[in-house]
Image (tube, grey):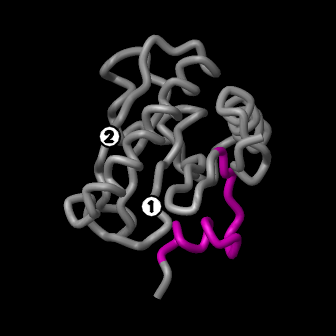
Amino acid sequence: MSTVFSKVINGELPGRVVYRSPDVVAFLSIEPLAYGHVLVVPVDEVDKWTDIAPELWARLNAVAFEVGNAVIEAFDAPRAGNVIAGFEVPHAHIHVFPAHSMDDFNFANVIPADQTDDAQMDDAANKLRAALGTDEDGNKI
């Protein structure tokens, strides 16, 4: 059975994709720590990050690095948070988000999906795409 991330990647579920390549996709989290919270995900379903081939793991981190710089630029954040948690969906992913202090890393403070503001989510996606130089599908322009 496909994971929810695979369904977003394949367009079966809606998602605000900000980056796409043949092996890595990045899209906004539906339960963000802050607006601009991105999940960097391998296209292939791998449950644990420690099971990812080293070459793909390096590629995921290169994309997370690029997204992190875009987060800093788009949200005027002093830092980009980077967390590997991976218990909520059995598909490895890296969380990248605007961070102003260590308090921003507390996953107890996520904005529930039913409480996110669609306009703010769309704005966050557009800001990130502009910083990354990608189109609405996440492809480089």
Q: Quadrant of residue 15?
A: bottom right
* Viewer-proximal residue among 56 and 19: 56
Q: Which mark is residue 135?
A: none
Asked whether, in this view, residue 47 is left or right of residue 64, the answer is left
Q: Residues within 10 Å of mark 2 (few under 14, many from 20)?
A: few
Report which residue position mark 2 lands on: 83
Amino acid type at circle 2 is Val
Report which residue position mark 1 lands on: 42
Amino acid type at circle 1 is Pro
Q: Residue furthest bottom?
A: 1
- Measured from the top left, where is residue 22 in percent x and y? 57, 62
Seen in the picture, residue 37 relative to 42 is either above or below; the reply is above
Chain part drawn in magenta:
3-18
Asked whether, in this view, residue 128 is left or right of residue 141, the answer is left
| Disc nearer the start of the sequence (1/2) | 1
User: Do the residues under discs 1 and 2 have CB atoms within 8 angstroms?
Assistant: no
